[in-house]
Amino acid sequence: MTDDAPIPTPIARVLGTQPASPLTFWASLVPGNWLQLDDVVITERELPGRGTISTAGIVTQVQARHEGASFESDVHLIADGFLPGEVVESAEITVTRVEPEIYVPPTPGAAVRRAEAAERDEALYFDSMERKLPIGLGRDGRPVYANLDFLDGTKGAHISISGISGVATKTSYALFLLHSVFTSQVLGAKAVNTKALVYSVKGEDLLYLDYPNTRLTDDQAAEYATLGLPADPFKSVRVFAPPRPGDSAGTPNVTGRVGGEVSSMFWTLYEFCQNELLPFCFADPEDDRAQYTLLIGQVAAKLKREAVPVGDSGAISIVGQTVRSWSALIDLLQDQLTDDNTRSNWTPGSTALGSVNAFLRRLHSAVRPLGPLIRGDLDLRGRQQVGTSQAQVTVVDIHSLADRAQRFVVGVTLRRQLTDKEASGSADPLTFIVLDELNKYAPREGSHPIKEILLDVAERGRSLGVILIGAQQTASEVERRIVANCAIRVAGRLDAAEASRPEYGYLPQTHRQRALLAKPGSMFVSQPDLPVPLAVEFPFPAWATRVAEAGTPPVSALRQAQGSSGAQGSSRSNDPFARVAPKPADDNPPPF
Amino acid sequence: MTARVWVDPWDPSFGTSLGDGALDESAAKLTLDLETPPESWAPVNPAADGWRPSELLIIDGVRRIDARVWFSDDDHPAAVLGIAASVAAGVVRIDGHARVAETRVGRGIFTSFPGADEVRTPIAEYPVIHTAGGDFEDLQIGVQQRMGELEVEAASASRAREDDLMIMDGPLFGRTTIPRALGYIKSHRASYLPPELNEIIVRLQAGQRTPVFTIGTTWSRHTWYLRLPTTSTSPWAGIVRCEAAESLSRAEVLRLADTSATVLPPFASEPYKDSRAPQNLVPIGGLERALRHRLGDPTKLHRALTAATAKS
């Protein structure tokens, strides 16, 4: 495509025994040369009166075979030197770009050469992307980009990442993408105010995002440099963890993360009533079919109307009784709803007693899971409410919670995020939401409050500036409308049965086969600009993913800011949780 | 005495390795005592420590009639026959690997018609090659000769070493000056040995040869029979005849004969892969396939010839 560059020698020629088309063609390699999957090649054709047509594409299949052998055993004869035969290699090339757009097939016999440097970027449309987000390294070791227009809502939004747990490194890739968004300068000045809400559903591995990774080698750091990204941990991270069960002080239930920002995550009884959080206690698939849906709304509305704050610990007074704990609130509801005299105050008389009992049974089963999260007994001075205003990356740690409680937290925090965004009335700055196990929160079947919120994010988030980075083992089990709204789709290692499902139609057959053996750190990224998914490898995390990797704890920019601003600093010193995490000596690694 | 019956191992369309059936009695002048006196003839086991060539060059050629053409002009109102033929010759170089080392492709219109003009088609050119006679057999001999020329060309172009061995498919006729060369004859039309010695051929085991003898017809050459490994029990199954130039010394011929009996049997082909197994050696089969491919597509050539001659 560039005129002045010398034309490199052909490494292959377009095959004539297979039909060549403008969309895909085969090339036979010139002996002594090789092509591998994902290599980018280019071929040209002179059209009378129209000049040179460049057809560029990606190698999607390579084959080698013996020519001259007609029986399978001939391979031994050829290898042993009895029968003359030749090894021929051919490559299937899926066309990515035809420039200018005249869709004529490349002519058999035409020279095929590797697309290097600018030609390679043109073949992959990187030259036409105004804002390029580095998304990893290609097989050739050069950066691969995604068009930010398809991520930030300009033309599309949302990312869906699929893959087997443990091998597919979905969360790691989601975080790498976040790192790239924040540090690649692609967002310009807006990057500073761009936020991310990350749900930590599996272990404590997301609690060290602001700790440097001591296992990052120089070579791995160099990969970041190639991508134009700093090999640094996340700058500003705030972790919200649920209070330790049975701890009256409400200490966050986090064992690692010495010296980092951790806040306890809970909701006061008053907030619970005022913000109508009751529906989020009923976010299981089985609640979907129950008869008490209407009752939930009625009770929630009544709680909102009647609850009056008592004291400054978040306790409430309702129907003349003071309630200081979640179990007490449930007991009160039990009394009110089972008493014939009071029930009609909460729900119209027509509600069947069976529905009321089912509702109460379900509520009772939530006593233990939600008890530590819905409180009326904690010192609220210096409390950090769960939200993304505290830091660039907010990690909500729900891995230690029971399923019921996880759903509650996800539902409540997501709704808060969405309503805050709606209230701000502007899509800028963007908020990224990283949520694993999307098949649990937005299953294909049924309907419940969290799924509705996620659908809302998927369908309206583009205009609200809320971008979902959803991950799941099985995209086939996630609500179709959510996956359909993701402009960028990513697949890591896939299960064989899963890979054959229509949800992965964006992966050509060879990519599906390769997805079965994709290594950790390898991803196939499909984006609207390109007709073929690109195989990328992303670098080893520059941030710690577990205690053993954690380097020197971060000195929080937030804490420095608070230290200098004074007023907030003093409120922080009163924070009942501040004393829990002892300050380590600066140079020593965490004592684990 | 019970009659015995065997199925000949060759594909019936190729005839048998014994030509059309009964071998003709040969009138050739025989010299039987070059190696051993006739009365003490017996199967010969090659010397185990004989000469081994550093590489083996196997020469073969293929020919095909692409079209029959007719010529006439005012002087010859009756049409004269010509054949448009494609010939190819090539060499397989075997030195641990087997590769097609040289190939030559030639085409021509073979005819005795004096005013014949070459035929040019968009895909191939057919120069005129005049033959002595105008019969179909004469034309075929012309084609055969052209193929022989190409074989010699390919053979001399492929020679790179001083200690190689060249095996020419077919008789050595006209090629006896090529050094270190053997003629390799798969099918036998004449019975050169007297009946009592022919019986030795039947007794040959795989890898054994008869003593070398000399035959003189229109030309003279040393020759010997050799049995290749075969599963058939047919009496002449796997028998081939090798020829060497008469100009060679007795010692040189015996050395070549022993070498042939050691070097050739491993290349014997399998009946299910080659319809002329085991005599059609594996590299020859591969070479013939490659050469036939080089001849080009017969349908296209025929059409091109028709189109080119229709225009003129």
Image (tube, helix red, strand yellow):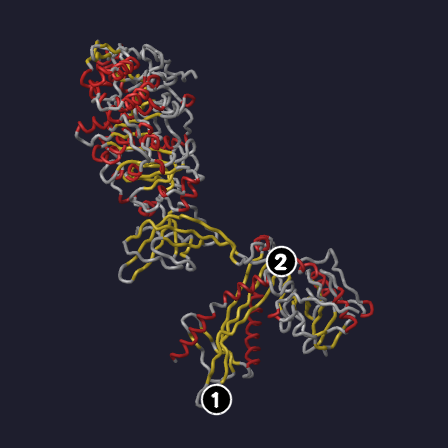
Which sits in the foreground, A275 or A391? A275
- The chain that hosts pointer 2 is B
Look at label 2 and name its amino acid: Glu
Q: State which quadrant residue B211 falls in.
A: bottom right
| Residue A206, percent from left and from top | 36, 25
Q: Which residue is mark 1?
A: B78
| Residue A490, percent from left and from top | 35, 38
Residue depth check, mark 2 versus mark 1: number of the one nearer the observer: 1
| Residue A279, percent from left and from top | 26, 24
- In the figure, A330 relative to B161: above or below? above
Q: Is residue A163 left or right of residue A309?
A: right
For image coordinates 27% across by 30% down, the residue present is A432
Look at label 1 and name its amino acid: Ala
- In the figure, A481 relative to A248: above or below? below
- Secondary structure type for disc 1: loop
Q: State which quadrant residue B34 falls in.
A: bottom right
| Residue A539, percent from left and from top | 38, 33
